[in-house]
Image (cartoon, rainbow, N blue to C red):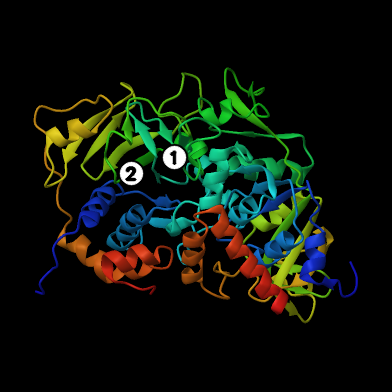
């Protein structure tokens, strides 16, 4: 046995996201998503390659040969089981804002834009919302701009939608019938009080809220030995900072 | 197309007239940044830029130089380097007209133009503020179903597609490999302007392996040789990203003055070469 370095907060988050990918066939990872990318690549390793992973911007983890459109066509046919989305703002109905704050179109604070969210949120069965920052600034009662809605009116074609919301403090599962989040677990080192103080929307919770499980030694090992180098192709700065890795 | 049609970068840049609609690829595809610098040297104005479907440094530079009237994009980002400073400032100041989209909407609208049909239906979007802010997008009931609303996007036909590729032959064919969004852009646009790393001696369409990843010269208006033409972005298997240069740009372009100083330095360097 070698001494394992202490578990880093990012590794915990990777562990939580990884746990949501078990048994899936194909996961795609979009722009600016190093932690979801690590979770998906780790599951590819742990599943012995049973999980196919497509990482946007990667040459090695690219299952597509028909250009930028193929991810979306593939998703529309149900060939992508899970995808990750973030949000400058996220509200209690699962609406996400990737566009900006302080008016539209001349936003005082402009985010990059909606990317594929206005489509993938509708067609991918398991969309995992992920945002490390968990503050009232991000977790708001109502987003200013709806890049993609959490739920749709009856009759709108929507096989997909939000599955969970994972933050630096906790994880929620989305209840599509009740159109709201239910707190599922709080990460080690954080409290219920903190979650309540930092969340701007109402949510359901069980009487006792469990603590988020730590990543398994097996997962940590795969991350450090295998995934770090793979991730460095697309996220060199992140891989270097977290694992001291360079592209494999 | 016949004969040697390679022209200089500055001649190529003349082909992007003021006020045209220009399609550009995302940072992970083939971005013609040397050509973009040449366009800025000739002070191109009032472009309608269509990012297919996102852009980074290229849109950022065009916006910073005041060359953009309208921007249509699903996102503008410098990736790990953070927000694109001149884009963010232009939005705040209302200096450009922004048409926010979602990635597949741009792909689908170009596909309509490829097929020569007036519109393309697309799933998603209903209930979003993207749709609310796009009066050019419509919702209709699927005529083959019952109570099945679906969005219709008008065909998007750019005047010009501009991109960088690994190689072109002297017949005007361009090898793009698997980066087929470049193919869609070129099919949809009235003409394409292409820069390449090098010339391929031979005919790309006569080699069955290469032909599958080749844009036939029939779609291409002009070419220029531009070795390291995507610098400082990474390009295919040719070269990695120049991270130090992009970081230097981001630090310098926090202010408009800084941006102008950076671009002037780029232009002086090009003049010296």
Chain under label 2?
A
B81, above or below A4, in the image: above
Residue B250 placed where, x, y %? 49, 60
- Helix, strand or loop at disc 2? strand
Residue furthest to the front: B257
Q: Which label sits in the foreground, 1 or 2? A: 2
**Can you identify the residue that label 2 sits on?**
A130
Residue B179 is left or right of residue B84, and the answer is: right
Residue B146 location, quadrant: top right
- Neighbor class of circle 1 (other Cα within 10 Å; few <14, some 14-19, many 20+) is many
Q: Nearer the viewer, residue B54 or B261?
A: B261
- Residue B252 horizontal/vertical position (percent): 50, 61
The local secondary structure at tag 1 comes to loop
Residue located beneath label 1 in the image: A124
10 Å crowding of disc 2: few (<14), some (14-19), many (20+) = many
- Image mark 1: chain: A
Q: Earlier in the sequence, mark 1 or mark 2?
A: 1
Residue appearing at x 82%, y 75% in the figure: B170
């Amino acid at each position: 046995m070698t001494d394992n370095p202490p578990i880093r907060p990012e590794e915990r988050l990777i562990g939580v996201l990884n746990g949501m990918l078990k048994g899936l066939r194909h996961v795609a990872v979009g722009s600016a998503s190093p932690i979801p990318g690590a979770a998906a690549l780790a599951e590819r390793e742990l599943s012995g390659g049973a999980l196919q992973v497509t990482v946007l911007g990667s040459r090695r983890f690219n299952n597509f040969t028909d250009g930028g459109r193929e991810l979306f066509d593939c998703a529309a046919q149900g060939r992508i089981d899970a995808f990750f989305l973030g949000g400058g703002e996220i509200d209690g109905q699962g609406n996400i804002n990737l566009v900006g704050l302080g008016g539209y179109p001349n936003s005082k604070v402009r985010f990059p834009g909606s990317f594929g969210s206005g489509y993938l949120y509708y067609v991918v069965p398991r969309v995992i919302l992920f945002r490390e920052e968990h503050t009232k600034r991000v977790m708001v009662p109502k987003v200013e701009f709806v890049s993609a809605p959490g739920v749709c009116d009856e009759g709108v074609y929507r096989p997909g939608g939000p599955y969970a919301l994972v933050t630096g403090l906790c994880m929620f599962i989305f209840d599509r019938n009740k159109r709201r989040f239910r707190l599922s677990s709080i990460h080690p080192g954080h409290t219920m009080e903190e979650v309540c103080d930092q969340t701007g929307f109402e949510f359901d919770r069980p009487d006792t809220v469990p603590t988020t499980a730590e990543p398994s030694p097996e997962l940590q090992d795969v991350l450090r030995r295998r995934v770090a180098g793979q991730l460095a192709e697309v996220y060199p700065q992140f891989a270097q900072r977290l694992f001291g890795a360079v592209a494999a | 197309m016949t004969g040697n049609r390679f022209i200089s970068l500055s001649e190529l840049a003349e082909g992007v007239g003021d006020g045209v609609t220009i399609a550009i690829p995302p940072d992970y595809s083939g971005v013609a940044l040397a050509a973009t610098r040449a366009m800025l040297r000739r002070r191109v104005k009032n472009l309608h830029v269509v990012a297919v479907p996102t852009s980074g440094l290229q849109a950022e530079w065009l916006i910073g130089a005041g060359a953009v009237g309208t921007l249509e994009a699903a996102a503008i980002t410098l990736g790990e380097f953070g927000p694109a400073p001149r884009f963010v400032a232009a939005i705040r100041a209302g200096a450009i007209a922004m048409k926010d989209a979602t990635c597949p909407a741009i792909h689908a609208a170009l596909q309509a133009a490829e097929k020569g049909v007036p519109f393309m239906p697309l799933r998603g979007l209903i209930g979003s503020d993207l749709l609310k802010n796009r009066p050019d997008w419509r919702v209709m009931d699927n005529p083959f179903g019952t109570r099945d609303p679906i969005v219709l996007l008008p065909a998007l036909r750019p005047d010009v597609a501009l991109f960088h590729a690994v190689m072109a032959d002297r017949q005007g064919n361009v090898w793009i490999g698997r980066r087929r969004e470049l193919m869609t852009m070129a099919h949809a646009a009235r003409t394409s302007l292409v820069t390449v790393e090098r010339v391929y001696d031979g005919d790309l369409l006569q080699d069955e392996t290469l032909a599958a990843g080749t844009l036939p010269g029939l779609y291409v208006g002009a070419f220029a040789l531009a070795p390291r033409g995507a610098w400082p972005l990474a390009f295919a298997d040719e070269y990695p990203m120049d991270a130090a240069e992009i970081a230097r740009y981001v630090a310098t372009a926090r202010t408009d003055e800084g941006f102008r100083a950076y671009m002037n330095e780029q232009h002086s360097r090009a003049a010296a070469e």
